[in-house]
Image (spheres, rainbow, N blue to C red):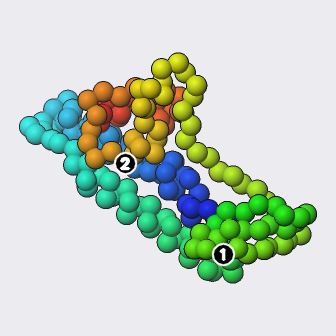
Amino acid sequence: MIEQKLIGGSCPNTNCLPSKNEIWSAEVAHLVLRGAKFGTPVFAARVDMAKLRARKREMVDGLIEMHLEKYKQSGAELTMGSGKFVAPKTIEVKLNDGGTRVLTSDRVVIDIGTHATIPDVPGLVASAPLTNIEALALDRLPRHLIVIGGGYVGARARGLSTFW
């Protein structure tokens, strides 16, 4: 396995699971702030972004450790770096810690993963938008938030409207 940066890929590190972690925090905030409707009035509540980020980081670190353990148990070798084909079924890996390594195999599976992009919308780049990566690393709650794109998880209005 050749991995450039994120052990386990983008889902446990920057996308699926970190966003769900924050959405659950938003759900908690939503319920707390509407506690009176459930017969449990709450007179003060605030979001502690440092604790929220620490909870997310702990979750991500635990998932990385789980993936490393699974590599170890399976006997698969994890090589950190970026690869390029130099011949059929032969990949040269530029190692993250320096040097190169050449790997060959009868089968090669390419999974390039995903990354955040900013669409070519007039004026959007100039407004310095946040991608999901930056949004999930905020140390404060923004006063306003507009979500462009994303799936149902990213646009779950009930929780996010309360949280943000």
Rendered position, 13 above or below 62: above
**Residue at the left extreme of this rendering:** 43
Residue that sits furthest to the top in the current view: 122
Q: Nearer the viewer, mark 1 or mark 2?
A: 1
Above or below residue 98? Residue 144 is: above
40 relative position to 90: left or right: left
Q: Which residue is mark 2?
A: 137
Q: With 32 as the anchor, is 85 left or right in this view?
A: right
Whether residue 10 sits left or right of residue 133 in the image: it is right
At a point 52% along the width and 56% down the height, the residue shown is 12
Q: Which percent across, then down, holds residue 139? A: 28, 47
> Is disc 2 surrounded by few (<14), some (14 to 19) or many (20+) residues within 10 Å?
some
> What type is the residue that disc 1 sits on?
Gly
Q: How many marks?
A: 2
Q: CA distance from mark 1 to mark 2?
A: 32 Å
Q: Where residue 9 sits: x, y (%)?
A: 59, 57
81 or 44: nearer the eye? Answer: 81
Residue at screen point 33% across, 58% down: 55
60 or 110, which lies in front? 110
Q: Quadrant of residue 162?
A: top left
